[in-house]
Amino acid sequence: MRYFAARRWTHRRLVIAVLASLGIVAMLGTVVIDMAGAFLTKDSGAGVPRTAAAPTTRTAPVIGIPLAVRPVAEVPLVANPEDCPPVPPPAPPDAPIRVCDVDRAAVYELGPVALRLNLTGVSETKLPASDFHTVQMSMDPASSAAFAKYTAANVGNQLAFVRDGVVLAAPSINTPIDGQSIQISGELSASPAATIATMLRGGT
């Protein structure tokens, strides 16, 4: 009986040991499978080039029609409003023109169109601590590069921004003008500044 009892106990222990072993194997199998799955997931993209999404840059849309830039051929003549010639019809870009400014205070003899600027924005603001206003216009990158090149080659000369047969501004080129913004300033009162800004935004 004692031997039989010992034998039964040993058999029970074997069964328990076998079941425990199966449980351990099952656990190990789960761990191995989980680890293998992790490696497979990690390596599944091996050898496949990954490309990062390139940042997108937005170019502001062009407003109005391109702004004509003409060289000033002669020193402007001071004029009375009645001395100004009528606004001429649209002239060929390679033809010189004779036109007045917004205030009809000066007559300009202008050469052929040197370049055209694509404008992307126009703003008109009052200068702080002053009664004068300023008009700022922004250009697209291609126009900015062309304008910088033109002003660098024409330092000491005078240019005119022309819209609809009217000189909006005629600054002298003291240094090359580099950048995507141009500011028209001086003794501009509210009315001519608003007129210039409106004409810059539109144009025919």
Image: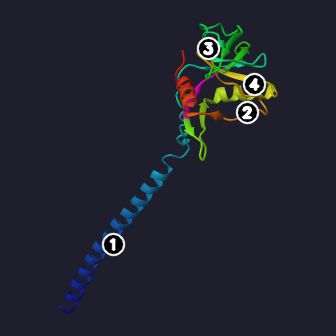
The correct choice, above or below, for 124 with respect to 40 in the image is: above
Q: Residue at x 60, y 31 (%)?
A: 137
Q: Position of residue 139 (x, y in %)?
A: 61, 30
Choose the circle earlier in sequence order: 2 or 1: 1
Mark 2 and mark 3: span between their CA atoms?
24 Å
Q: Position of residue 156 (x, y in %)?
A: 82, 27
Residue at disc 2, secondary structure: loop
Choose the circle earlier in sequence order: 3 or 1: 1
Mark 1 and mark 4: span between their CA atoms?
87 Å
In the image shown, does 82 or 40 lie closer to the viewer? 82
Choose the circle earlier in sequence order: 2 or 4: 4
Q: Residue at x 65, y 34 (%)?
A: 187
Q: Which residue is mark 3?
A: 165
Query: Which region shows up in magenta?
Result: 116-123
How crowded pointer 2 is (Cα within 10 Å; few <14, some 14-19, many 20+) is rated as: some
Residue at disc 3, secondary structure: loop
Q: Which residue is mark 4?
A: 150
Q: Which residue is mark 1?
A: 21
